[in-house]
Amino acid sequence: MAPQPTVPPGSPSELFFAFMKLGLQGFGGVLPVARHALVEDYGWLTMEEFTDIVARCQALPGPNIVNVSICIGGRHFGARGAVAASAGLLVAPFVLLLVLGVLYSGYAQLPAVTNALRGVSAVAAGLILGTALRMAASPRVRTLRAVFGVAAFAAVSWLRLPLALVLAVLIPASIGAAWLARARGARQS
C-alpha cells in the first residue's frame, strides 16, 4: 500500500486551532492524540515523518509534544508557524489547568475525585502504550537502531545504571554501528 500524500496546513491560524484542539483532547497525554490527528485526520505527515520528528524531538529539552508542534509549525511557516502551533498547544490547557487546580484544592478529599484521577491515569498509560506499539510497526524502528533504544531502556530502567554512563557508551556504539552498516551498504551497491 502506497503512503498517502501529505497536505500542508493552510495558515498559521489553522496550525494554532489544530494544536489547540490537540492540547484539549489529549489532556495528560497529547502524543497519542497528536499522532492520530497529524497523520490520519489532517494528513500533514506520514507515519514515518511523524516517527522521525518525534525521535528527533526526544533529544531536545522540554516536552516532546511541544517540540513536535514547534517543528511542524516551523516546517510550514517558519517562526510564525512555530509560535502559532506551540501557543495553540499550550494556551487552552494552561487555562484549564489553572481552573482544575482551583477546583482540586477544594474537592481533593472526595473519593469520587480520587477514583476519577486513577481512571484518567490508566487511560493515559493505555494511550501511550498504544502509540508506542503503532510506532514500533514503522519500518524505521525495525532496524539496528531499535536495539540501541531497547538497550538504553533496559540499562536505565532495569539495571539502574546512570543515564550519563549509558549514553556515553551507547551513543558512540550506535554511531559506529550506523557507520558500519552504511559502509557495508556502499560496498554492496
Image: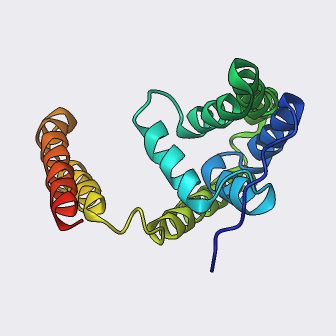
Q: Residue at x 16, y 42 (%)?
A: 166
Q: Looking at the picture, does residue 60 appear above or below residue 138? A: above
Q: Between residues 175 and 28, which one lies in front from this camera angle?
A: 175
Q: Picture quarter containing residue 139?
A: bottom left
In this rendering, is residue 164 above or below 35? above
Snapshot colouring? rainbow
Q: Is residue 16 left or right of residue 125?
A: right
Q: Based on the displayed image, in which of its 4 quarters is residue 23 positioned?
A: top right
Q: Nearer the viewer, residue 171 or 150?
A: 171
| Quarter of the figure with the N terminus | bottom right
* Residue 93 higher or lower than 8, as above or below: above
* Residue 186 spot, x, y in % from top left: 21, 58
In terms of image quadrants, where is residue 124?
bottom right
Q: Nearer the viewer, residue 151 or 174?
A: 174
Q: Where residue 42 appears, x then y in whole percent?
A: 80, 55
Residue at 39 percent across and 63 percent down: it is 141
Total numbered badges shown on the rendered structure: 0
Seen in the picture, residue 139 relative to 105 is either above or below; the reply is below
Q: Dividing the image into 4 quarters, which one contains the C terminus?
A: bottom left
Residue 29 visible to the viewer:
no
Is residue 72 something that shows in the picture?
yes
Specify the farthest residue to the bottom.
1
Q: Position of residue 33 (x, y in %)?
A: 69, 55
At which x and y percent is residue 160? 17, 47
> Residue at image x 49%, y 63%?
132
Most foreground residue, 129 or 80? 80
Q: Residue at x 74, y 34 (%)?
A: 89
